[in-house]
Amino acid sequence: FLIGNFQGSYDRIAPQFLVLSTLNIFASFYLGFKYGINKLFSDLRGSSLVITYSLYIFICIISFTVTFNKSEALIVLSQYLTFYISFLVIYLISLNTKINYLKLFISLSIISIIIESYGVLSTAIDYFLINGNEFARSNILRGYSGNINIVSYSIAIKTPVLLYALFKINNKLVLAFLFTLLGFSSLIIFMLMSRGAFIAFMFVLIVMLLFKLYISFKNNYLKALLISITVILSFGFTETYINQSENNVLAERLGSLNDTQDPSINSRLRYFNDAFLSIKKNPLIGVGIGNWKFYSILYDYEDMEDYIVPVYVHNDFLHTATEIGIIGLIAFIFIFVIPLLNLTELLKKGTYSNESLFLILIIGVYIIDSMLNFPVSRPISYVYLIFAIVAAIKNKLDLNDA
């Protein structure tokens, strides 16, 4: 996610996909030479998630035959194939190397939060505090991502890992650092005022605290209290600073969640309705992968302003159904369902329960994002999901081997 726009790329996802594809090539050759093709295929054959994901990709390829614009379909298909190969590579590495995959995942998540928080806060301090500009919700605070909504979700989706570490670790120095990081992370989420990310973060916080208090109130109440105080202080600081700027946007944005006249909500509802109409017309195979951006004009041309085309439905599930049909949607949904079922089973058994919970919450945040935005099109979001679902499958396999 540190890779930005360069060499005139139209969007930072272009160089990100280039680097991701290059990594896939080197990693695939490495795995093939080290372990052999037969061994790798044997590892993949028994995984229900691999089978489901492969079916989803196969349906995407089939939908290519009905596309109106073949070149755009090829671009999107290549992106989905890049994610698919990344998933296979990460899954095979987790199975065939001696690294502690979950520990590595947790470490990388916390490092990512540090980097992303720095990217946003350093800009905010320089622009608003040092230069004296009045605080406003601005894309200048996007950090290393494409916009402020993406970075908000990117931080929110990693907060389950941070909360897990806070309850797991007892070293006072490390705890002080993690509480500080939680304060910065929650401050950013409140400051950037992404309504979906705010809801996702509060969902994570409430579920995690209630779960830990239910498991052991005596052992966890102090940390739960300190976590709550940290988040409340961050919220209070944000509100105080915004009120000083006479720009209390956060309360207004949260209050507009049930306002269908809000421009953002109104446009999303319109896109959802257009998607339903398209799905009703093309239920089996859709309009073809990567081609909704063209068909959306037929549905939305009367409401379009300044020639802004609704490229995405702003709901990955509806977007998937419009492009590759209902069967493709079912396969896409099961990419989430299979790891969630595995994690729920472990949670009920009490085995890896803490680890299972934070992985469930990560997938939950991603689903919330998917219901309102288009993270499947953003490497910064989707690659992290891949790491999380591989961790979910790896936990189940480790239990079976124990």
Image (cartoon, grey):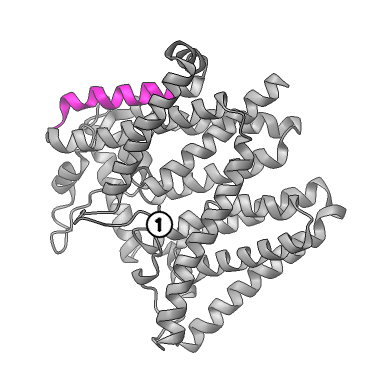
Is label 1 in a helix, a strand or a loop? Answer: helix
Viewer-nearest residue: 304 or 124: 124
Of the pair 283 and 21, the residue shown nearer to us: 21
Magenta stretch bounds: 51-67
Is residue 68 a member of the stretch shown in magenta?
A: no
Above-or-below relation of 84 to 3: above
Magenta span: predominant SS is helix
Q: Residue furthest right?
A: 218
Picture quarter with the C terminus: top right
Q: Is residue 234 left or right of residue 41?
A: right
Horizontal side of residue 392 vs 274, given as left or right? right
The location of residue 168, given as percent across then percent down, is: 74, 50
Image x and y of residue 97, in percent: 57, 27
Q: Is residue 243 above or below residue 158?
A: below
- Image coords of residue 294 (percent x, y): 15, 43
- Residue carrying label 1: 150
Query: Residue at 76% across / 34% down in the picture?
Result: 350
Left or right position of 278 against 213: left
Above/below status of 82 relative to 301: above
Residue visible at 49% across and 66% down? Answer: 118
**Residue found 51% across the figure and 64% down from its top:** 117
Residue 141: which quarter of the image? bottom left
Residue 197 visible in the shown view = yes
Amino acid at circle 1: Ile
Residue visible at 75% across and 29% down in the picture: 349
